[in-house]
Amino acid sequence: MSYSAFMNHQNFLDCLVQHDAMTSNDGVVNLSDLELLHRRGFGFKGIAKRGNNRECKFSLSIQPQKLIDDNTLTCTIKLNDSSPLLIETDLGKFPTPLSDCKNIDDISFGAAPAIAFPRRNYRINGFDQEKYVEELSQIYGEEITPWCEDVTLELRVDDPEDDAVPKIASLLKNIILATWFEGLSTTGKTKLDQHEHFLVDPEEIISEQNKLNELTPNLVTNSLAANGLYFDPNVIKDCVTALKAGHNIILSGAPGCGKSILAAELTKHLGTNPVSCTATTSWTSDDLVGRYLPHPSGQGLSFIPGFFLKSIAGNVLMIDEINRCDLDACFGELFTILADKTRTQAQHLPFCEPGREGNPSKDVVVAGEHFEKDSLRDDNVRLYSISKDFRIIGTMNSFDRSRLHQFSAALSRRFSVIPVGKPTQHANVLAGTFSQGIGGAQYNGAINGALESLLESNIEFLSPALVESMAEVCRAIRNGSPGTAGAAKKNLLRAFALVAGNQLDIVPELTDNRGSESIIQVLQTLRSATNISTIPWNNFISKLSDLPNLSEHRKAIRQEFLGNE
């Protein structure tokens, strides 16, 4: 089908509903009796079918304004005339606006990799997860681990080709199936039947299980290298070994050594829906475990899970700057669970989920996946089940260790601390990457050599992040124009003053040397790397030593490099 004029969103829907891909029998769910919605919105309705006797009426509404304004395919789905089970969920984007397409072949579409089903999408009474999982377990004759909070379904696109309409049709058929699957215990007209096969076969449900068994040092190293990032191979090996041995880990090192980058990379390989957060000095157990907040309806309170409870479903929690919070106060209620590698214990938390509409409140309990649930005295609990593969990954700035909260002996037993230093063996590669294309061959050659020398030094303060920032300042100074080697050296000193000058006073903390020697060593390394002449160097030292944060080191710096006070 084609159009003499450019397409609009109604033309797009006409094409989609009439396309063979929408009603073909090659998907996990088939659609039939499709009709466009006219009276109550923009979209279509029909019957979803799976197998011979399993079918469900559906109505799929698409937001035309989102389609027009930002080229996003956003839909709401209702099943069997019930309340909407999926509400205003983004399914993907059109790189080219539909208004710029003359026919169906001009359409391109980028599908979202995963669709989230948060609790807010369920009806007012909520999704009875425990009852649903219990019924599933009875049908299959095996225990099925429930999920917590947000549920993310990885949706398979049946047609891998670039043609947009088959791809969209496959995505919509899968999202209708997923909504049907999620709505089984919230709609009165769709029930589990113990005498039939279930709507979705178990092997077709893509779980959010941790990828810990697949984690290898090479996998992490290659993924980092693809983005121009390098770490000491022994650091990566230690991280993988500790995680696979059942340990939570904390990456410790100087600012700019890449702790957060490495933590994020490990987190990405451990879980499909990880939770990441940054600790602050104001954190309490409310932030990590949970707290009570007013219910959106204005009636009573609701229990809001903290970062730890939210992360259980995704099997990994990343906490940046972990020692900025009072660790014992925040983790205190979780000590038992963190130490339980067998995942056979349970911990009652001092919270309950208030009941609604006459339902009793539920005590909040965290338990290992192998905990005997029959041992609970009260069945009326909100149970968070932790997998044996659940891990916490934290980062800790070693520069601030004397100023921030310390680990107690009880808590330190539950973490392996792994030092992350400079990847000096990759200095040449990093320097080449940082200096590329700044200011011509002579300029770049001088910059590259100086940066490589700084990265090869054993001074943690001269970190890859700091050196990269210096290169970016030089790039901003040149603004694309070529320069000489002499200009490169002067620009590097200027960049160092801008990037590192206000941090030099904390260098002694890294070396446990409270005198000025460690600062002087940094400056000596800088001079050696730039190999700059005396006059510009002295001018640099005169201005740098006047910085307020270097007042107590000013005399020593000037005596070392200027021979006077």
Image: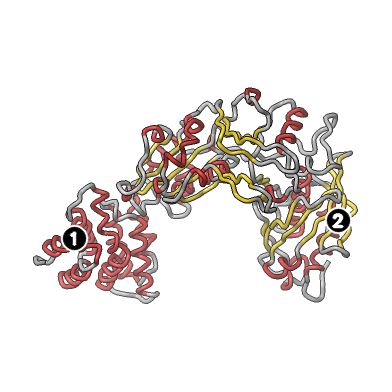
- Which class describes the residues within 10 Å of circle 1: few (<14), some (14-19), or many (20+)? few
Q: Residue furthest left?
A: 563
**Mark 1 to mark 2: distance in Å?**
75 Å
x then y, percent, for residue 148: 63, 40
x then y, percent, for residue 258: 40, 51
Nearer the viewer's eye, disc 1 or disc 2? Answer: 1
Q: Earlier in the sequence, mark 1 or mark 2?
A: 2
The residue pinned by badge 1 equals: 552
The residue pinned by badge 2 equals: 45
Residue at image location 48% in from the left, 48% down from the top:
264
Q: Is residue 562 left or right of residue 434?
A: left
Q: How is the image coloured?
A: secondary structure
x then y, percent, for residue 240: 45, 37
Mark 2 lies on a secondary structure that is strand
Residue at image location 62% in from the left, 38% down from the top:
352
Q: Residue furthest right?
A: 33
Q: Is residue 243 left or right of residue 84?
A: left
x then y, percent, for residue 527: 20, 62
Mark 1 lies on a secondary structure that is helix
Give amino acid for label 1: Glu
